[in-house]
Image (spheres, rainbow, N blue to C red):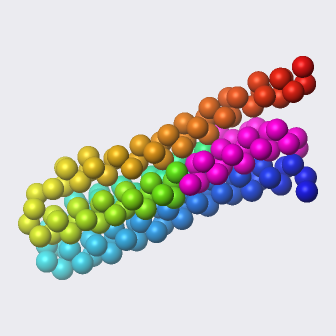
Amino acid sequence: MEAIVLAYIGLGLMVGLSGIGSIYVVSISGNAAVGAMKKDPESFGNYMVLSALPSTQGLYGFVGYFVMSGSIANDWITAAAIFGAGLAMGLAGLFSGIRQGQVCANGVAAFESGHKVFGNTMILGVFPELYAILGLLVVILINGAIPGLLASVAG
């Protein structure tokens, strides 16, 4: 196997897993919003925001792709770094998205029941988001470390 294949697998995991996390949870919170609109259609704006909040994980994976795609090379050190970054971002996006979607769906259900929890749900929904942001930061840090890794091996 060529090293570049490992790098592209990493990029695929980065975008794919983050995207799956967003797809899955946007539909969960969207389903909760549709159910809530049966009782309270005037609150559509609040439901829409809570349903869209978990979509950011997929965007972080997409941004991570552009950060790392400029570093692709056919050497094992770079390929391993890109694979590791892709796995880190992909898993962070997948699992933080799932948990964020659950928080948002529960917020929709509580809001629909008459509890004024929109702001609190937004705040609590940000906590899982932070781990997706950390995953993106890991991608940026690994991308910055690749030249140093190559220099240490060559020198």
In the rendered image, the residue lying farthest to the left is 114
- Location of residue 143 with respect to 21 vertically, above or below: above
Q: Is residue 8 left or right of residue 55?
A: right
Position in image of residue 110 (x %, y %): 17, 65
Q: Which residues are magenta?
A: 66-91
In this orientation, does residue 72 appear? no
Q: Residue at x 66, y 35 (%)?
A: 142
Q: Specify the principal SS of the magenta part.
A: helix
How many marks the image carries: the answer is 0
Q: Nearer the viewer, residue 10 or 39?
A: 10
Position in image of residue 47 (x %, y %): 25, 64
Position in image of residue 68 (x %, y %): 69, 41
Position in image of residue 16 (x %, y %): 61, 61
Q: Residue at x 76, y 38 (%)?
A: 71
Assign the N terminus to one quadrant of the image: bottom right
Q: Residue at x 33, y 67 (%)?
A: 29
- Location of residue 142 with respect to 113 vertically, above or below: above
Residue 18 sits inside the magenta stretch: no
- Location of residue 22 with respect to 39 vertically, above or below: above
Snapshot quadrant of residue 41: bottom left
